[in-house]
Amino acid sequence: MKRYYIFLLSVLIVACKPETEEVDAPAPPLPEEALAALNLPDGFEIHTYANVENARSLALSPSGTVYVGNRSGDKVYAVQDTDGDFVGDITYVIDSGLVLPNGVAFRDGDLYVAEVNRILKYSDIESNLASPPDPEVIYDEFPTEKHHGWKYIAFDNDGKLYVPVGAPCNICNPDDEIFASITRMNPDGTGLEVFAHGVRNSVGFDWNPETGDLWFTDNGRDNLGDSIPPCEMNRVTEAGQHFGYPFCHGGYLSDPEFGELGNCDDFVAPQVRFEAHTAPLGMKFYRGNMFPADFKGDIIVAQHGSWNRSKKIGYRLMRVSVENGEATGHSVFIDGWLNDDTQESWGRPVDVLEMPDGSLLVSDDQAGKIYRITYNG
C-alpha cells in the first residue's frame, strides 16, 4: 500500500501543470490505478472509457457514438465502443484547425459544433466518421471575443439549438445584449433570439424531464475574494428572464462596480448557490435506472475547480437534489481529483453524459480522459 501511494504521488506531480482560466495545459495519460484516489459512494465504480486530449463537452448519437469537443486544442473527436465492452476502442478526428470547438450536439444524423463565432454542421456524420465531410456554416455572426467565448450547445425537444454567449470580461456591462446571455436558434441557423439575459458564463445546461424548464450553471465573477460571489445553478421558467449579471450575484450580492444600475430584487435568484470559484460546468438530470432510485430526477454537476483562489476548491462531481421542480440541496458525489493537503490536482471534470444503460460518462480536460461511472450495489 505504501508503494502505491508513493507511485500515485509521483503521478500527481508529473500530471499537474500551472493553469489559467483561458487554457488548461494537457497532461500525460494517467494509469488506471490513479482512479483509486477518487472517493465514490458505496456501490459505485469508475474506469476510463477513453483517452482524449483536453476532453470537454460530450454528445451522444443514437448509435452510441460519443462526440467530444475541445478547448485548448483545435479538434473535435468521435469515440466508438465497437465490441460492447464499455470502453471506447476507436477514436476518430472529425475535424481540426478549429477555433475553441468546445460545444458539440447531435440531431437527426448531423453533428453540430460550436466555435467562438460560428456554428458548424457535419451532415450524415455517422456514415462518414473515417472521412468526415466539410462542414456547413449555419451561423457565423456570434462575437469573436475569446474571453468566455467557448460554448456549450444542446437541442431542446422542439429542435431549437441553445448557444450561450459569455461576457467578454470578468466584470463589465456590454452594450450588445448578445453578451452574457443564452441564445437559441433554429437548426438551420435562422431565428436567433436571446432566451436568457444576465448569464456571465454558462458552460452547461439541461432540461428538467418533468417540467421542461431549462436549468443552467453559471460561473461567478472573480476578484472579490475567496468566498464571494457564489457560483450558480439557475432555472429558466420563461423566455427573457434576467439572472443578474453584472449588477447582482447569487441573487443577493450587489456588484461593487455595477450594482447601482440594478436592484437584486429585479432579477431571478439562483436555485443553487455553489461555493465561490468552484466553476460548475456540465450538468445532467439523471433519467436512468442503473443508479439508486433516489438519484432519478436529481442533477449531477461537474465542478471544474478554481484557478485563482488562495486555496483550491472544486475538482469534483456534485449531486443536486430536486423535488417538485425545485432544488432542495446539494452534496459532493465524487471527489479526489484535488489533493486538499498538497493542493495539487490531477484532473478537472468538465461535462456529464448519461448513457442508455444509465451509466454516466464524465470528461476531464486536464487528465485527457473520459470516465464511465457505474453502480453495482
Image (cartoon, rainbow, N blue to C red):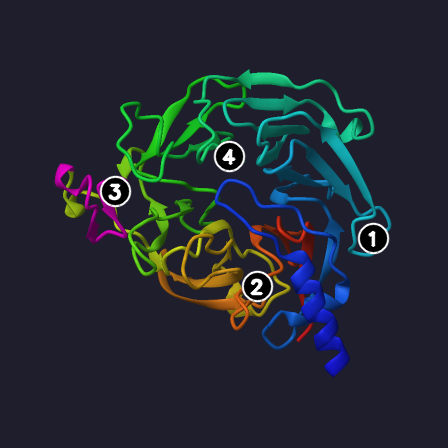
Q: Which residue is mark 2?
A: 344
- Pointer 1 or 4: first along the chain: 1
Q: Which residue is mark 1?
A: 84
Which mark's residue is nearer the viewer, 4 or 2?
2
Rendered location of residue 77, percent (x, y): 71, 36
Query: Is residue 34 shown above or below 74?
Result: below
**What's the residue type where badge 2 is placed?**
Glu
Q: Which residue is mark 3?
A: 244
**What's the residue type where badge 1 is placed?**
Gly
Q: Nearer the viewer, residue 141 or 255?
A: 255
**Residue plotted at (70% across, 44% down):** 53
Q: Residues within 10 Å of mark 3 (few under 14, many from 20)?
A: many
**Mark-to-mark CA distance, 3 and 4:** 21 Å
- Pointer 1 or 3: first along the chain: 1
**What's the residue type where badge 4 is placed?**
Trp
Q: Report the magenta residues as a range.
A: 244-261
Q: Quadrant of residue 320?
A: bottom left
**Mark-to-mark CA distance, 2 and 3:** 34 Å
Q: Which residue is mark 4?
A: 150
Which mark's residue is nearer the viewer, 2 or 3?
2
Q: Nearer the viewer, residue 202 or 17?
A: 17
Rendered location of residue 80, percent (x, y): 78, 43
- Pointer 4 or 2: first along the chain: 4
